């Protein structure tokens, strides 16, 4: 989620707390703030138990990044160098699997392919999917076939 999205969510929660304080019921809060009734009921429960403070964001959910900020900088530099610099010479694409392998080699930390994908996006990169071609492919025969269609 973007910073603007997190900020909007925080503002909406504060607005919800203000409405609860005025006695507005969760379904009406959901309608007014354009959120799901489930969210409104959850917020109402939190508000009853701990007031406005209970509705404050607790930060990003999910597991913490296993690489330090310094390691993330190093990883970005490695990605900038390209795959050939790190042993993948057959093509110049960073696949998520290669990045997960690179992280394991350089930082001794295990990342799944999906985790490596999220990490790449966080660093401003996108994983690529190499174009696989059959080794026996006859390019001229393919061109003739395409032209005859």
Image (cartoon, rainbow, N blue to C red):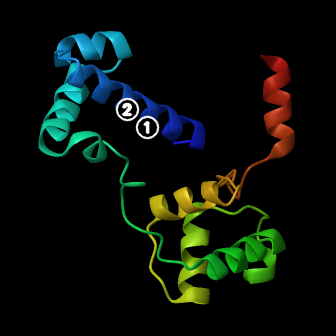
> Which one is closest to the eye, mark 2 or mark 1?
2
Q: Secondary structure at mark 1?
A: helix
Dot 1 crowding, Cα within 10 Å, few <14, some 14–19, many 20+: some
Front in this rendered view, residue 136 or 31: 31
Residues under labels 2 and 1: Cα distance?
6 Å
Give the left or right position of residue 24, taking residue 58 as reference.
left
According to the picture, the residue beneath numbered tag 2 turns out to be 14
Residue in the image at 69% along x and 50% along y: 131
101 relative to 58, above or below? below
Q: Residue at x 29, y 29 (%)?
A: 17
Q: Depth check: 109 or 38 in front?
A: 38
- Give percent across and percent down for residue 145: 79, 27
| Quadrant location, the C terminus | top right
Q: Position of residue 117 (x, y in %)?
A: 55, 58
Instruction: Give percent across and percent down for residue 141.
Output: 81, 38
User: Where 35 falls versus 3 (above or below)?
Assistant: above
Q: Are marks 2 and 1 in contact (CB under 8 Å)?
A: yes
Residue 88 appears in the picture as rendered: no
Residue count near mark 2 (Cα–Cα under 10 Å), binned few <14, some 14–19, many ≥20: some
Question: Disc 1 designates what residue?
Answer: 10
């Amino acid at each position: 989620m973007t910073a603007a999205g997190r900020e909007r969510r925080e503002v909406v929660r504060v607005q919800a707390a203000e409405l609860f304080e005025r006695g507005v019921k969760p379904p009406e809060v959901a309608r007014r703030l354009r959120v799901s009734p489930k969210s409104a009921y959850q917020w109402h429960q939190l508000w009853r138990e701990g007031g406005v403070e209970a509705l404050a964001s607790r930060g990003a959910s999910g597991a913490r990044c296993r690489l330090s900020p310094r390691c993330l900088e190093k990883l970005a530099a490695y990605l900038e160098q390209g795959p050939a610099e790190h042993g993948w010479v057959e093509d110049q694409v960073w696949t998520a699997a290669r990045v997960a392998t690179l992280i394991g080699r350089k930082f001794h930390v295990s990342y799944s392919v999906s985790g490596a994908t999220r990490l790449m996006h966080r660093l401003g990169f996108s994983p690529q999917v190499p174009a696989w071609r059959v080794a026996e492919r006859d390019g001229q025969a393919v061109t003739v076939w395409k032209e005859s269609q």
